[in-house]
Amino acid sequence: MSHSKSPISLNIIIVGAGLGGLSAAITLCLAGHHVTVLERATTIGEIGAGIQILPNASRLLISWGLAPSLMQHATLPKQVNMISWKGEHIASMDFHEAAKRYGSPFWDFHRAGLHKCLLERAVELGARVVCQARVMDVEIGGDKSTVVLEDGSKIYADLVVGADGVASRMREVLMGGVDPPMRTGDLAYRVLLSTEEMKKDPELKGFVEDPQVNYWLGPDCHAVNYVLKGGKQFNMVLLVPDDIPDGGATTVEGNVEEMRALYKDWDPRIPKLLSLCTQVHKWKLLIRHPPEHWYHPSGTFVLLGDSAHATLPYLASGAGMALEDAAVLGECLGRIRSREDVLTALAVYEVCRKERTARVVERGNVQQELYHLHDGEEQRERDRKMRMFPTEAGE
Ligand code: FAD
């Protein structure tokens, strides 16, 4: 995949060095622009646990020159299995066959590994990444936007890209007022296990030796797991009804006993895995529908990633959508021949991205209902359909 390169260089500020912001740093450097990324955290890195990267996104990462570094961090799962909460196999999809069809692999990463590769590539291409730089506001006016930092200092840019995640201040700047994300009714427990103990248990060691992605579907909850770091770590995500009070912190320490109680009657392998967990955090799951407009009519401000369209993680596609945004924005801004073209480039970016990301946000909500059905006719119908049409993740 070749990248368009503009003969003029814009000074671009990206707010947020998450997976979306760093991807945009790569594509905008490849498009010939000067890029500065401002990140509020003291160090650049990703907390959290595992992440699945589907072929639509792995194709982009490869095209940005990341394959050699990513291969040091990636696990290639053989297949995805859908399993009932009581342990009955429902359906599987062979990832290797699907990867041949899509022309790009399914990868699982520890987020820190993926993030490190993106950061290194962005810096290699010339992006300047600044930590401890919390953006409080953006003054949009004329042919420039001015970023206002926490210490009151101001930086001018031809274009500001708001990539500050689901709790986005940049979206409020664009919308001109308070615009909180929507609650979904679910939260995620994220568990990372060392595989040493698992390998000693005949019932669990298969999970480590044979990398597969497993989904257990049950009433009001589901569970997902897969190995990371070539089998050194085991990632579990447990999706359950949200009990984190609204309006406060969205990531809080969880209680291991409470988490285990929710899964005590499930496939015995799940309680067994959870017995190996000693501490856990829980994440409130919030979404955002794409806004009517993604850019300011001045052509100096635009949104990207979760700030525009955070989705439930039930299609494993939120980061994939942010990477696609970055690819399209880079391509559009690589084709400009003068400053006057920027507005058209942003309009094309919005048109290319809005419908697809809206569909993914909606499909995530549908998936929430399907994955959490109670035993009964609807659930049997779901399983029957899954057997006919194995889940084509990432479509
Ligand atoms: P973020 O990753 O949130 O990054 C935003 C960055 O902006 C952060 O570094 C933040 O510190 C910084 N920031 C915020 N405010 C400011 C400010 N004012 N000034 C400066 N910096 C600021 N997606 C997948 O594709 N596959 C998966 O398997 C998957 N699993 C998931 C599992 C869970 C439990 C969850 C919750 C999400 C999952 N996702 C998955 C979704 C994915 O994590 C997100 O879609 C993706 O991280 C969004 O990237 P982003 O860069 O837009 O936002």
Image (tube, helix red, strand yellow):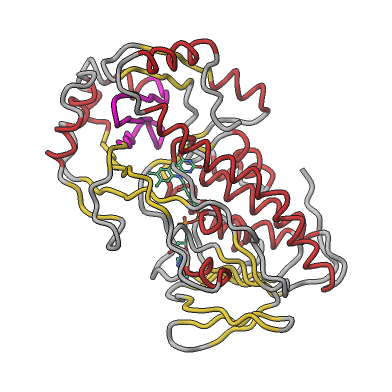
Residue 162 at x, y = what percent?
57, 66
Region of the chain picked out in magenta, as a range = 210-238
Residue 45 located left or right of residue 347: left
Asked which quadrant contains residue 122, the reply is bottom right
**Total count of labels:** 0
- Asked if one can make out residue 73 in the rendered structure from this viewpoint, the answer is yes
Q: Main secondary structure of the magenta part?
A: strand
The answer to whether residue 216 is magenta is yes
Residue 360 at x, y = what percent?
56, 40
- Above or below for 364 versus 321: above
Residue located at (35% from left, 30% from top): 225
- Quarter of the figure with the N terminus: top right
Residue 337 at x, y = what percent?
87, 67
The answer to whether residue 191 is magenta is no
Residue 264 located left or right of residue 232: left
Asked whether 179 or 10 is in front, the reply is 179
Residue 76 at x, y = what percent?
50, 29
- Residue extending farthest front: 377
Residue located at (16% from left, 26% from top): 264
